[in-house]
Image: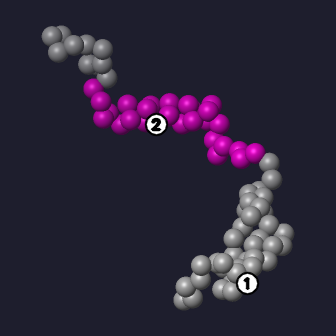
Amino acid sequence: MVNCQHNAAWQHANGLSQCTRCGARRFTDYGALRPEGLPQPLRTRRQLLVERDKAAALIIAKGHYRVSHWGFSKAFT
């Protein structure tokens, strides 16, 4: 591996700079790495809420919780 301080001249072309001594490359324009447009969420907020409701209903249906005791303090159980 070459121990280069990158003090030599740099060649610049189309968003890329390259050291003329060792050939190290640096991206100067990150537009090439990022797709056009705004990023889209994988799921909308509405879809997340529906998924959480279904997960809660499944947990209750499997009986992991004693539904009859929800909302009561220990004094009533």
The three-letter code of the residue at mark 1 reads: Thr
* Residue under the image location 74 percent in, 64 percent down: 28
Residue range of the region highlighted in magenta in the rendering: 38-66
Q: Is residue 49 above or below residue 74?
A: below
Residue 36 position within the rendered picture, expressed as x and y whole percent measured from the top left: 80, 53
Direction from residue 40 to residue 62 in the image, left or right: left
Q: Nearer the viewer, mark 1 or mark 2?
A: 1
The residue singled out by tag 1 in the image is: 20
Direction from residue 73 to residue 3 in the image, left or right: right
Direction from residue 36 to residue 19 in the image, left or right: left
Q: Is residue 63 above or below residue 11?
A: above
* Residue under the image location 75 percent in, 45 percent down: 38
Is 20 in front, or is 1? 20
Q: How is the rendered protein coloured?
A: one colour
Q: Residues within 10 Å of mark 2 (few under 14, many from 20)?
A: few
Direction from residue 8 to residue 63 in the image, left or right: left
Per the picture, the main secondary structure of the magenta-coloured stretch is helix
Q: Quadrant of residue 51?
A: top right
Is 5 in front, or is 74? 5
